Amino acid sequence: NGEKNSDTEAVDSMQTLLKCCGVKNYTDWTNTTYFSTNKTLPLSCCKNSSSPQCNGKLEEKDQFNTEGCEPKLEKFIQDVLTYAMLVVVAFAIIKFFGMVSVCAITCKSRRNGYEPLYA
């Protein structure tokens, strides 16, 4: 129906970014008021949103993304969390080796008869 609000823009952005359509798949849109009003899928479902051939009609299935957004969004979040976890583990390893190095330097300096600066 052409109305744009924050929800509509969020769904359109997600479908465009993730190249998906609907929750489970594109047929989820057939049960919405948007589809009953327009008899088309949102243009954000189009594989190429700037293509004049894609008009959202169900008969032209090859023009739009048929895969649902839920599995793609889950994979995206899982990938982000995996990356974040790897970064945290890498910093923990660096910190561990830093602490071991400081301990080794401190122990070696005590054996050489140096007075610690903090005494």
Image (cartoon, grey):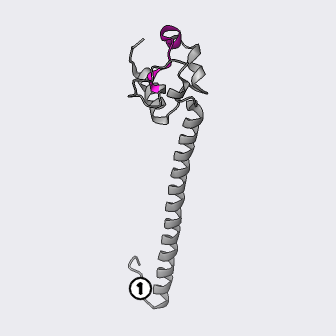
On whether residue 38 falls in the magenta region, the answer is yes
Residue at horizontal 55%, vertical 14%? 32
- Quadrant where the image shows the N terminus: top left
Q: Using the rendered image of the protein, determine whether residue 64 is visible from the camera's viewpoint.
A: no
Residue pointed to by mark 1: 115
In front: 80, or 11? 11
In front: 54, or 101? 54
Q: Amino acid at mark 1?
A: Glu
Residue at horizontal 49%, vertical 66%? 94
Q: Which residues are magenta?
A: 34-44
Residue at horizontal 40%, vertical 27%? 51
Residue at horizontal 59%, vertical 20%? 28
Q: Residues within 10 Å of mark 1 (few under 14, many from 20)?
A: few
- Quadrant where the image shows the C terminus: bottom left
Residue 86 x/y as whole percent: 54, 56
Residue 55 x/y as whole percent: 45, 20
Q: Secondary structure at mark 1?
A: loop
Relative vertical location of residue 62 with respect to residue 38 in this rendering, above or below: below
114 vs 28, left or right, is left
Residue 62 x/y as whole percent: 54, 28
Please state the total of marks drawn on the protein image: 1
In front: 86, or 2? 2
On whether residue 30 falls in the magenta region, the answer is no
